[in-house]
Image (cartoon, helix red, strand yellow):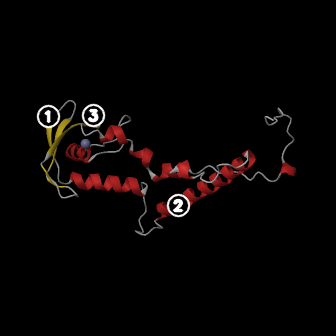
Amino acid sequence: CFNMVLKGARGLPVTAIVQYTFDKMNAYFLKYSMEMDAQIAGENKRKYKYKFPPKVDEWLEFQSRKADSEKAILYDNEEWKYEVKEPGGTTNDGRQHGGRAFKVSLTRCHCSCGRPLLLNLPCSHLYTAGRVRNVDINHPLTVRESEFSIMTVKKTWAPRFHPYFDQSQWPEYHGVQLWPDP
Ligand SMILES: [Zn+2]
């Protein structure tokens, strides 16, 4: 988490905090750039060339697999409204639950489970309906898969910092003079 990046900067003089932040950011951007490049190139444990960052990839894979056991029933052919039924089963902690049903609108790429709107990623129900209709499930208001692609993440970390040399090479300062409060 980003809050941890500047851990250790507390209680330092202002110039030291600025330098510390600068150095940390420089290292941070490089580290994540290189990490993304490795994932894209497949230089990871799974030897897998990621199209999405691993966490997102995991989500998409899970939802897609879940969709394999779901069924969609058409309710409205104008709005492409479907009821998607999820089979019952046993949760991780061993509790039994019955099947559940959700309402999907394929024209709006919306699902009553709320996930597409909340996460801007598809849920299994949307996958199911999309497969039945054979249409894309991306939508500017809900599912925006392209924004989560690993190439987009790569761009986030693409800007570079520039060395600021030493004080003797800095341009002369003619701005406001500031003095500490005595
Ligand atoms: Zn859903």
| Furthest residue toward front | 182
Pointer 1 residue: 75
Residue at 51%, 63% in the rendered image: 38
Q: Residue at 84%, 34% (x, y): give it.
A: 177
147 above or below 27? above
User: How many residues crowd mark 2 within 10 Å: few (<14), some (14–19), many (20+)?
Assistant: some
Residue type pointed to by label 2: Glu
Give the amino acid at mark 3.
Thr
Please say whether residue 39 is visible from this viewpoint.
yes
- Contact, CB < 8 Å: mark 3 with mark 1? no
Query: Disc 3 on helix, strand or loop?
Result: loop
Numbered circle sitting on residue 107? 3
What residue appears at the point 64 percent right and 54 percent down from the top-left corner?
24
Label 1, secondary structure: give it: strand
Query: Which comes before the other along the chain, label 2 or label 1?
Result: 2
Image-based side of 181 in relation to 74, left or right = right
Residue 9's label in the rendered image is: none
Per the image, label 2 sits on a secondary structure element best described as helix
Q: Is residue 96 above or below residue 46?
A: above
Task: Report which residue position mark 2 lands on.
Answer: 35
Q: Where is residue 97 shown, x and y percent of the image?
A: 14, 50
